[in-house]
Amino acid sequence: MFNSKTIISWIIKIGLLIIPVLPLVITRSLFFPFITGRNFIFRIIIEIIFILWLWLILTDSNYRPCSSVVFYSFAVLIGTLFLATVFSISPYKSFWSGFERMEGFWGFWHYFLYFLILTCVFKKEDWTRFFLISLGTSVVISFYALFQLLGKLSVHQGSVRLDATMGNATYLAIYLVFHVFLFTLFSFKTQKNWLKIFCGLLALFELFIIYHTATRGAILGLLAGLIIFALINVIWARGLARKASLGLLAVIIILPSLFLVFKSSDFVQSSQVLSRFASISFAETTTQSRFIIWRMAFEAWQDRPVLGWGPESFVYIFSKYYDPALWPQEPWFDRAHNVFLDWLTSSGLVGFLAYLGLFGSAIYVLIKCFKTNRIEIEELAVFLGLLTAYLIHNLFVFDNFTSYMVFFGLLAYWHVIYTKSEKSYPEGQVKILGGFLPPKVRWFLISVTSIAVVFSLYFFNIKPILAAQGVIESLKQLTYSRDGARTRDLDRGQQVLKEAIAKNTFGTPEVREQLAQYAERINQDPGTSDEEKKQFLKYALSEMQIQAEKFPYDMRAKAFLSSLHNDSGDPASAIVAAQSGLAVSDKRQQFYFLLGEAYFKAGDETSAIRVLKKAYELAPDYKDAIHNYAVILIFSGYPQEAEALLKKHFGMEVYPEAKYINAYAALRDFDKIVIIWQKLVEQDPVNLRYRLSLASAYIKIRQDEKAITEIEKIIELSPAFKEQGVAYIRQIREGRLDR
């Protein structure tokens, strides 16, 4: 007979069984399509089933949480995150995060509810379904990656590193690492030989895909995990498991050894994957940047050692402790690229120890379950190998929704098998949440919670979804063709952005940043009227001003604000914004660039030279710093100094770049302009615009025949230009062109 409890529990289970499928979700209609969609679906599912679960636990003790060291470890972690959020430098950001990550305290609260509901509702057969669905999903994703490898589908991150439905090779790699171990587990658990072979083949297939992600941290973690797995089986297992593990150990020893011997060979160097591993060294740019970022993170932790800076605060840490040597890397790191340092900086020593407690408690319950015969040695080997792989991987990168989803699901499973094995309690479980409440109280709690969840579903899910859709819609309206011309509706794009911002969601800061970027692009669009540019810049400025005031620690907002003021012709305000950024991040070259531009536009060339020289001195090998310093020297009447600088760094006194043309034009040094256009034409001989500009430069220095030669070449390359070109040549010979 089906009763209400049975029906509700099945609805909850269906919701939970949908979650392993979410890595397949790509929502191209939302901002950050590989993150936001699956996160919102996850949160909506959790919030809905939470109401149903609350009703169950208030009416039936069998659905209440059980006590275990894993449960308490997770609860301590959530409590610590809450305190770190309260005392964060930006509590709002720490609580909500943003579209790009969707973590923060609110995200982890949903992960905790996910863990709790799994532990309370799932039975043995449900766990089997859960893991089978997850394994099936991983196979589908692996085939998606295979089609990318075969060239049938494009790689989303624009490289040869497979990313499937994750949009990031690193995310795909760790997701599949989990499932390689789970396939190994199923091959041990099943009694059917054909199924053992099938699971083994699928594990090998996913290993193949992991290899082609070229994610070094995940692969190193996988190797370490497999070593632990094999060693445990070699020491304690018997029969086939022991023999297979011996073979695995031999392979793990032989293959890396062969790689080290032949890493300089043509075979290795010609491989996109193997060459990445062969390039690993302490001198490698990526390695060096990791060390720098880790040092910055450690310095930041020392300033706030107990509870850290708050979740989602690393972008501020990155600015405050910025090292100029990081210029070859991305300009805004929001993670330490080391999970342990992320926890150390975001929630201090307390949060760091709480996070380690998750792994410690997992290892404890697994060993306890093995000793009480709840799991076999092969299962213990798989799970400890998996934990090792995950730990090593986390030394080099950071987590995401898919890795959290699998890891917290596994934590729930380990908690369950542990609490079911406890013999010291008559019922086998230690229930939390005391006795029953009076019916009126129960219904009051359910009603209040239901209202709160409905509120959350709309304000914290539906509205942000609509805002994220608005960003994509605005992008469609504000796109540009290859020649830089806007192809859609500016007014509509602006209106959509206004509507997205007006929704006032946790993603609003990211919407404002998109607005600022659009404004900068539009300002460079020759097809947009001055009035339209002015209007768009004014709106972008007003919103970024709000952003800078609401989030005083947001250095990106200050940078955008300074840039927009420069674009709008207000250098005085640009100076103020750039200086406020430098007050926090005094080694950040970007703020010196913005300040130098503002000083120049304000007519203070001396100050412009001073700050751009400072930016250059912070990292003399930074190309942008070299060029900005050289250009301002030319504009200010010091071309010899600029040319000496360029000669020192690039081996040429005249550099082929458009910004130098404008600088030399200010000095009316057309001989240098000719040299620049000549070099640009050499680099791109079929570029008609380059050749026409070179012809114009020749006319300026009265080398008419050379100008005519260039125009004749243009006619040869583009017959459609013949009539215009002939007319141009006639004007040159008649001396009717402005020189």
Image (spheres, rainbow, N blue to C red):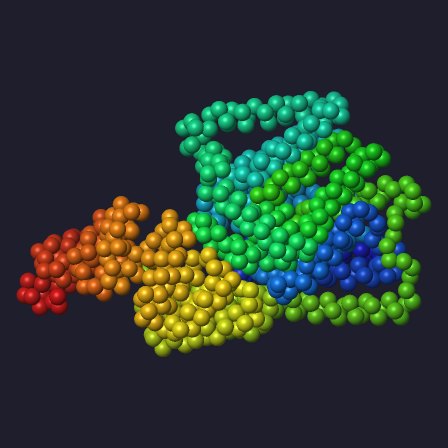
Up the image or down, 134 lies above or below 509; here it is: above
Based on the displayed image, in which of its 4 quarters is residue 651 positioned? Answer: top left
Front residue (pair 514, 39): 514
Up the image or down, 154 lies above or below 389; here it is: below
Quarter of the C terminus within the rendering: bottom left
Q: Is residue 320 visible?
A: yes
Up the image or down, 673 lies above or below 219; here it is: below
Give the number of callouts.
Answer: 0
Front residue (pair 396, 175): 396
- Residue 189, image x, y percentages: 74, 33
Q: Would you say 430 lies left or right of 510 here?
A: right
Q: Residue at x 68, y 56 (%)?
A: 307
Based on the displayed image, in which of its 4 quarters is residue 304 positioned? Answer: bottom right
Q: Residue at x 81, y 67 (%)?
A: 446
Q: Residue at x 27, y 64 (%)?
A: 636
Q: Residue at x 9, y 60 (%)?
A: 702
- Residue 453, image x, y percentages: 73, 67
Which residue is situated farthest in the right direction here? 426
- Residue 734, image x, y percentages: 5, 65
Q: Is residue 687 visible?
A: no
Quarter of the N terminus within the rendering: bottom right
- Residue 77, image x, y percentages: 73, 53
Front residue (pair 10, 105): 105
